[in-house]
Amino acid sequence: MFHPTVFDNLKVVLEGAVYDADFDNVIFVTGRNDLADLAAFHRSFQIEFCLADDVLIDPADKVMAYVKLKTSLADIASEQLEKSLTDHIGCTICITFKMRVREVVRETEAIDAILNEIWGNRPQISQQLMAPIDSGSRQWPPEQFEDTITLDFLRKIDEGNIQDMRDLLDHCFLSMKKLKELL
C-alpha cells in the first residue's frame, strides 16, 4: 500500500487551504504547478493567486503571491527507506510576492517594514528588481520596476507544522493587502 510522504501530506493541506480561501472569495487562484523533477529527483508544488478584488484589474496594479513547497531526493529516500539520509526529514516552503514599484528606495524599504511587522522578523526577506525594456523605447531609468519579494524560512517543515498552514496563509493574505496599499 502507498504511504504518503511528508511532502504529499503538506501539499494536500496547503492546496486545500488555498482553495478554501478561493472558494470564500478572499483570493483568486491563477495557476498551479505540481512537479516531479526526474533530472534532479525532487518534487515541488507551487500555487499562485491574487486578491479576489484584483482579478479584473491590470496586472501592474496588483500583488501576486506564489507559495512553493519543495522536497529533495534525500528527504524522499529517507522516508521510503526508513533510513536517515538527512538531518531532518521534511520540506521547505517559500513565499514570493510580485508587484511593481516606482520609487525604488522608499517603496522597497516600506515593503521590508510591512513584511517584518506582519511576519515578526522571522523569514529572510530578499527583493529583486527587474526593469522592463521595450524594444521600441529604451527609457532609463524606467518609470517602474517589477519587484520580486521572497520570504525564505530557512528551515524544513513536516507534519508537525500542518496546523501552521492556515496561519501562514492568513499572514500571506494580510501581506498582499498591505503591499497593495503601496501601489
Image (cartoon, helix red, strand yellow):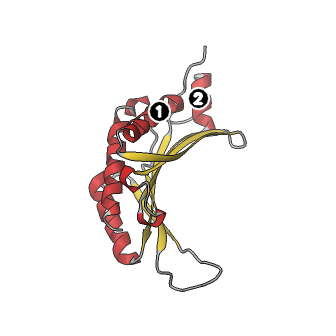
Picture mark count: 2
Residue 11 visible to an observer of this rendering: yes
- Which amino acid does the dot numbered 1 rest on? Leu
Disc 1, SS: helix
Compared to residue 67, the image places residue 2 above or below, namely above
Q: Determine whether, in the image, residue 3 is placed left or right of residue 148.
A: right
Where, quadrant-wise, is the C terminus in this rendering? Answer: bottom left
Q: Nearer the viewer, mark 1 or mark 2?
A: 1
Residue 122 numbered mark, or none: none
Residue 3 drawn at (x, y percent):
56, 19
Residue 10 numbered mark, or none: 1
Quick one: 68 or 87, which is closer to the camera?
Answer: 68
- Which amino acid does the dot numbered 2 rest on? Ser
Outermost residue to the top: 1
Residue 40 drawn at (x, y percent):
69, 43
Q: Which residue is at a point 38% across and 50% down the rendered structure image?
A: 52
Label 2 environment density (alpha carbons within 10 Å; few <14, some 14–19, many ≥20): some
Disc 2, SS: helix
Q: Which residue is at a point 34% across and 64% down the rendered structure image?
A: 112
Distance (Cα) linking label 1 and label 2:
17 Å
Q: Quadrant of residue 111?
A: bottom left
Residue 86 drawn at (x, y percent):
55, 35
Residue 21 drawn at (x, y percent):
37, 40
Quick one: 52 or 143, which is closer to the camera?
Answer: 52
Residue 120 visible to an observer of this rendering: no
Give the residue pinned by disc 2. Answer: 78
Where, quadrant-wise, is the N terminus in this rendering? Answer: top right
Quick one: 32 or 148, which is closer to the camera?
Answer: 32
Q: Earlier in the sequence, mark 1 or mark 2?
A: 1
Label 1 environment density (alpha carbons within 10 Å; few <14, some 14–19, many ≥20): many
